[in-house]
Amino acid sequence: MRLAIDYTSALRQAAGIGRYARELVDAILATPAPHDFVLMAATAGLSQHWRREQARLQGLAAVPEQLRFRGLPLTDNWVARLWQRLRVPLPAESITGGVDCFYSPDFVLPPLRSRTLALLTVHDLSFIRHPETFTPALQEYLQKAVPRSVARADFILADSIATQRDLVELLHVPADRVTVLYSGLSAGFQDTPEADERARLKTRYGIGARPYILTVGTVQPRKNYIRLMQACDPLIASGNLELVIAGKPAWLSEPIVEAAAERPYTRLLGFVADADLPALYRQARAFAFPSLYEGFGIPVVEAMACGTPVVGSAVSSIPEVVGDAGLLVDPLDIAGWREALRRVCEDSDLRADLRARGLSRAPQFSWARAATQWLELIAKIA
């Protein structure tokens, strides 16, 4: 088959869906398969980055001769305007050439010719479950564009059983059209510390002088960081503990930033490079993931792989990912979060137990396994 993949999110987004798309595509290309691949991306302003990425992908592809690239000289915002807001009926095949199947890893599909099969990943339906955590403009866009793409897709990938259930319940998708494909664990996330990592974290981020509770994720309302700060207030009041938030500020982040600024021992690091994340996890006393809703929650797997005890929200996909390897708390229960984090920070036996459970569970999530499953679905489509 000739397969096209929308690589725009992988090219333009450092974290979140961008990382998902890069890791999955890397693993797919590294797996020998009898297919030709065309990677399409909105490349305006990123010509050098796009050339570097092409060279990287050619280097890891099992069969480089099967790989082609097509750039669209627009930004991702302009592509969204043309294809999703204005609905200009220019088919993606005018860029990729004729293909048997088009795959989008990022919620929405471009216009496609009627004979092209459409495969779509929907990571979550948070814009329906928690519309209050989005700006009105973004929420309106997602409410229109995602259900429209879901209705057009021949097959849908969901990040978790929880997201599969939401697709069936909220968008009335037949269950047999949805396949659960779990995310994997990126290379470098393991529990053996590097010799200088504590000093490196102190130099680059000014942390490590005190034990800290870590959370990782984009700074926006769905991540529930203000309640986490409130839960941590009594724990860090003595100055012997810090709360560290690693993530880039996004929409509606101003109240979160202000709440952090009012707390001397809460640190907003902004975006943290992938190379520094494993050390950040390993040096943490505990990892907190208080999100109101997640389609999967890659940081949970990363924390477990680094041997960091996990406290996560008891909602959506998070219990599915954590299993018995962490403590689970209602995300609205501030007192419950305070007690769970206090237990993990003060009880060395509990920390050791959660560490061992996490290290055992994390390898169950593999990008190689995800790629194999993706290719099996393509074989089924063929």
Image (spheres, grey):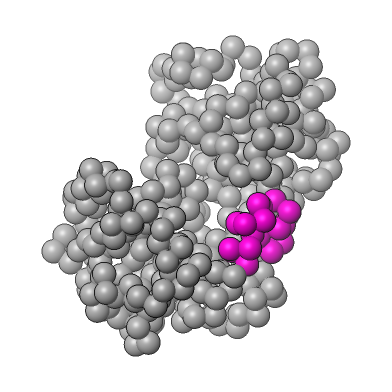
Q: With 22 as the anchor, is 271 left or right in this view?
A: right
Choose between 110 and 155: the one closer to the eye.
110
Which residue is depicted at the point 46% across and 13% down? 203
- State which quadrant residue 356 falls in: top right
Which quadrant, please, contains the N terminus? Answer: bottom left
Can the viewer see residue 363 in this picture?
Answer: no
Find out whether residue 189 is within the magenta segment.
no
Residue 143 occupies quadrant: bottom right
Residue 280 appears in the picture as rendered: yes
Give the magenta part as a residue range. 127-143
Residue 382 position, x and y percent, is 33, 84
Q: In front: 245, or 300? A: 245
**Which residue is at a point 44% across and 29% down the rendered structure image?**
276
Q: At which x and y percent is residue 300?
A: 58, 44
Mainly helix, strand or loop, the magenta region? helix
17 relative position to 56: left or right? right
